Image: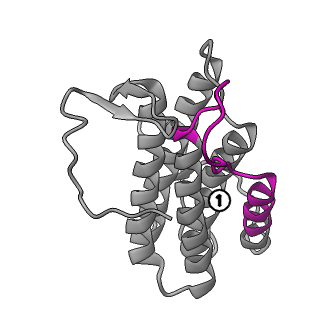
Amino acid sequence: MVVLNKIYTKTGDDGTTALGTGERRLKYDLRIAAYGTVDEANACIGLARLQTGADPDLDRMLSRIQNDLFDLGADLATPETEEALDYEPLRVSDAQVSRIEADIDALNAGLKPLRSFVLPGGSAASAALHLARTVARRAERMMVELAEKPGEHVNPAALKYMNRVSDFLFVAARVVNDNGARDVLWVPGKNR
């Protein structure tokens, strides 16, 4: 259980932060930036939920995703190590990936296939979900970059999950646009 009784510790005043393993890294370290960007995506989803609250099923799905993103941040904050830890680190699971895939399929079932790319907009809720989607994609790119660095490891299920989050947000943005009826479609070369 997490207990936060004092918010500032002053331990980060030197420009470092602690990982779940106790190792300290610079605050601009790619691992820190990756889970910080996951947190940013989570905050964007929180703002989007203020616009989408009229749909209780979608709100429950978004709430689960927000909780899962905290799991994902904890996963990234506790890299695999040769040394034994005093606790079992929290890892994103394949079951979480399967659940979000089922949610995507359920939302997508009522949508017509796209014939063009969708521009963010149509409604405030859709635009907010698209913003969250772009931040989730940035987090995913950072996680992929981190996984490619020598000596770093990223849980494959966490990578899959982050990829599905942006897919979910795209489909959800279409759903809140009256099931795609209010989507703003890209018209290539329209303003030449």
* Residue 123 image point, x, y percent: 43, 70
Q: In the picture shown, does residue 60 fall above or below 170?
A: below
**Within the magenta stretch, is there residue 84?**
yes
The answer to which of 64 and 84 lies nearer the viewer is: 84
The vertical placement of 189 against 8, above or below, is: above
Q: Residue furthest top?
A: 150
Foreground pick, 78 / 40 = 78
Tell me residue 183's x, y (percent): 55, 64
Q: Quadrant of residue 128?
A: bottom left
Question: Residue at image x 72%, y 62%?
Answer: 100
Q: Quadrant of the C terminus?
A: top left
User: How are the colours assigned in the image?
Assistant: one colour
At horizontal 39% and vertical 35% (from top left) the residue drawn is 18
Which percent across, then down, holds residue 175?
A: 61, 72
What kind of residue is marked 1?
Answer: Phe
Q: Residue at x 58, y 49 (%)?
A: 72
Label 1: element kind: helix
x 58%, y 32%: residue: 143
- Where does residue 173 sit, x and y in percent of width and height? 55, 64
Answer above or below: position of 86 versus 112. Answer: above
Q: Which residues are magenta?
A: 76-104
Asked whether residue 121 appears in the rendered view, the answer is no
Q: Quadrant of residue 64?
A: bottom right
Q: Is residue 100 magenta?
A: yes
User: What residue is pinned by disc 1?
Assistant: 168
Total residue callouts: 1
* Nearer to the camera, 75 or 135: 75
> With respect to residue 186, does 48 lie above or below?
below
